[in-house]
Image (spheres, rainbow, N blue to C red):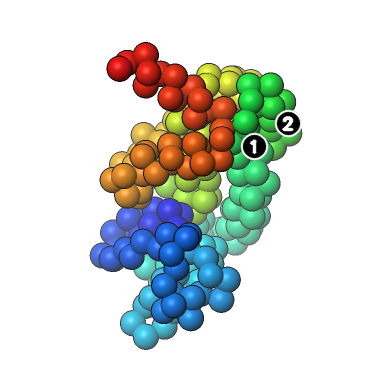
């Protein structure tokens, strides 16, 4: 859902959000979402589902365009957006690792995905950024920002050094998490929800978090 909210905010669209929890999905939601997943966008009497479809619709119908105008560049942006699941899987393995050892292994396993993005930021962008295409936020940024935001919280806790050899990716990550559009795309209680999710999944990061809290108290 966060990807769609980022795009809506970037375009200055007025919208309302109804939050759906995974363990308490209402019947009306299940009737309009074929996969039973968020996001779902209600436009007048029409319902759209799936993040990619929603963001493409928004970009085609509401200015300013976040995709490049050049058709080749636009197609390549879409291709890198499709790489998001591979990337998120790699970072997720680091974030939700249950021990320090498995986290270290996950960080090593994430290197190929990070290397591909490091190359993409060099070849596709061809400028100083700070976003995927340059100075302006784009659809690719909206796709990766949710995962980079969550990884940043993990990195602040665990100091894995996962991105130390990928300076362009790391700078891109920092630019996104510092962006007001991205920061405002989550609910006020986002941090609490994320931390509780780490605990539910018995993540090593949760152990570090709770240890830090005990030391403070």
Q: Residues within 10 Å of mark 2 (few under 14, many from 20)?
A: some
Residue 151 vertical position relative to residue 45 in the rendered view, above or below: above
Q: Residues within 10 Å of mark 1 (few under 14, many from 20)?
A: some
Q: Residue at x 65, y 44 (%)?
A: 89
The answer to whether 24 appears left or right of 97 in the picture is left
Report x, y in % for residue 21.
Answer: 42, 59
The reply to whether callout 1 and callout 2 are in contact (CB within 8 Å) is yes
Residue 66 in view here: no
Which of the 4 image quarters holds residue 92? top right
What secondary structure is found at the residue carrying circle 1? helix
Label placed on residue 194: none
Label placed on residue 93: 1
Q: Residue at x 48, y 60 (%)?
A: 22
What secondary structure is found at the residue carrying circle 2? helix
Residue picked out by circle 2: 109
Q: Which residue is drawn at 61% across and 49% down?
A: 84
Residue 169 vertical position relative to residue 14 in the rendered view, above or below: above
């Amino acid at each position: 859902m966060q990807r769609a909210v980022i795009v809506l905010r970037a375009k200055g669209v007025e919208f309302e959000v109804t939050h759906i929890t995974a363990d308490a999905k209402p019947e009306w939601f299940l009737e309009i979402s074929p996969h039973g997943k968020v996001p779902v966008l209600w436009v007048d009497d029409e319902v759209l589902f799936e993040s990619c479809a929603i963001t493409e619709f928004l970009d085609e119908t509401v200015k300013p365009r976040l995709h490049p105008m050049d058709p080749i560049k636009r197609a390549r942006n879409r291709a890198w957006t499709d790489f998001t699941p591979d990337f998120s899987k790699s970072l997720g393995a680091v974030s939700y690792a249950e021990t320090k050892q498995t986290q270290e292994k996950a960080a090593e396993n994430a290197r190929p995905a990070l290397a591909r993005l490091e190359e993409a930021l060099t070849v596709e962008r061809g400028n100083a950024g700070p976003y995927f295409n340059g100075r302006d936020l784009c659809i690719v940024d909206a796709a990766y920002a949710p995962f980079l935001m969550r990884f940043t919280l993990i990195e602040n806790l665990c100091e894995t050094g996962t991105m130390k050899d990928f300076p362009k990716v790391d700078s891109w990550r920092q630019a996104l998490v510092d962006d007001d559009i991205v920061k405002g795309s989550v609910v006020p209680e986002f941090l609490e929800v994320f931390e509780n999710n780490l605990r539910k999944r018995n993540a090593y990061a949760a152990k570090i978090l709770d240890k830090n809290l005990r030391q403070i108290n």
